[in-house]
Amino acid sequence: MPTRPPQPLTASGAVSAGSRPVPIGSPTRRIDHLLTSTFYDHQGRWACERRSRIEAVCTLWADQLGGPGAPYLDCETVDDLLRQKGHQEGGLRPDQIPVGTPTSHWWWWLPDLPPTVA
């Protein structure tokens, strides 16, 4: 049985992501549903993790998804819901935010702003 040479994860995933746009939209729909209901247990952290994953996909595979402005890259509704949720239910404790989380992922620190980089 012939074997294919190993490929970097981003290279092998980019083809799949570009040819299957429906699953990319699915995470935003699931997070929309979560953000319109009350958080229980660790759902606040889960929502932040999901948003960070969406951000990674949008960053790594923007060209394969249609480039900037493509509908799969639009997280405005999710971001608005995250802001509302942060103001309504409060945010995560500092020990719940993963070490090394980039401050560009501001949703982890809601309802506050991310810390400034010294």
Image: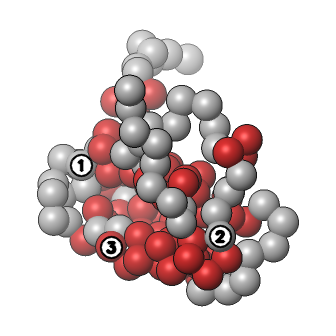
User: Mark 1 and 2 residues: CB-CB less than 8 Å, in contact?
Assistant: no
> Closer to the camera, 40 or 6?
40
- The type of residue carrying mark 3 is Glu
The residue at which mark 2 appears reads as 90
Q: Residue at (29%, 62%) from the top-left corner?
A: 73
Left or right of 109? Residue 92 is: right
User: In this orientation, does residue 108 appear?
Assistant: yes
Which numbered disc, 3 or 2, marks the residue that appears first in the sequence?
A: 3
Task: Give the quadrant of the C terminus.
Answer: top left
Tell me the CA gap for discs 1 and 2: 31 Å
Tag 3 or tag 1, which sits nearer the N-term?
1
User: Split into 4 quadrants, where in the image is the N terminus?
Assistant: top right
Which is nearer the N-term, disc 1 or disc 2?
Answer: 1
- Foreground mark, 1 or 2, reads 2
Residue carrying label 3: 76
At a point 41% along the width and 70% down the height, the residue shown is 79
Element type where label 2 sits in the image: loop
Vertical arrangement, residue 82 with respect to residue 19, above or below? below
Residue 62 bears which disc, if any? 1
